[in-house]
Image (cartoon, rainbow, N blue to C red):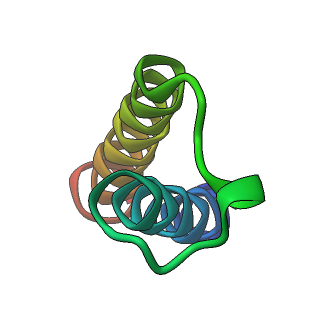
C-alpha cells in the first residue's frame, strides 16, 4: 500500500513539475494554459516531492528494516 502511494504521488509530482517547467521556461503552451501564480505551483510541487520522499523512506523501512 505504501509503495503504491509512493508510485502514484511520484508520478503526479513528476507531471506537475514538468508542467511548471513548461509553463515557466518555454513558449510551448498556449496562453490560456500558462501559470499566473508560479510561487503557489512551485510550493505545491515541493510539498508533493516531500510526500513522495517520506513515502519512499517509509517503503524502505517497511520492506528492509522491519520486514
Q: How many marks?
A: 0
Point out residue 58 in the picture as x, y percentages from the top left corner.
39, 44
Position of residue 35 relative to residue 14, above or below, is: above
Q: Residue furthest bottom?
A: 28
User: In x, y percent, where is residue 62?
Assistant: 40, 52
- 12 and 41: which is toward the camera: 41
Residue at the outermost right position: 32
In which quarter of the view is residue 7 placed? bottom right
User: Which of 25 and 12 lies nearest the eye of the viewer?
Assistant: 25
Looking at the image, residue 45 lies above or below residue 59: above
| x, y percent for residue 50 | 35, 33
Taking the image as shown, residue 24 lies to the left or right of residue 25, namely: right
Q: Residue at x 45, y 39 (%)?
A: 45
Q: Residue at x 54, y 57 (%)?
A: 16
Q: Quadrant of the C terminus?
A: bottom left
Rendering coords of residue 25 (x, y %):
27, 59
Question: Quarter of the image holding residue 36?
Answer: top right
Depth check: give the residue in front, 33 or 1: 33
Amino acid at each position: 500500500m505504501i509503495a503504491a502511494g509512493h508510485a502514484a504521488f511520484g508520478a503526479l509530482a513528476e507531471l506537475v513539475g514538468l508542467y511548471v517547467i513548461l509553463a515557466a521556461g518555454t513558449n510551448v503552451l498556449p496562453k490560456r494554459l500558462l501559470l499566473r501564480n508560479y510561487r503557489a505551483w512551485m510550493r505545491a510541487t515541493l510539498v508533493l516531492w516531500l510526500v513522495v520522499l517520506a513515502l519512499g523512506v517509509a517503503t524502505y523501512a517497511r520492506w528492509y528494516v522491519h520486514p
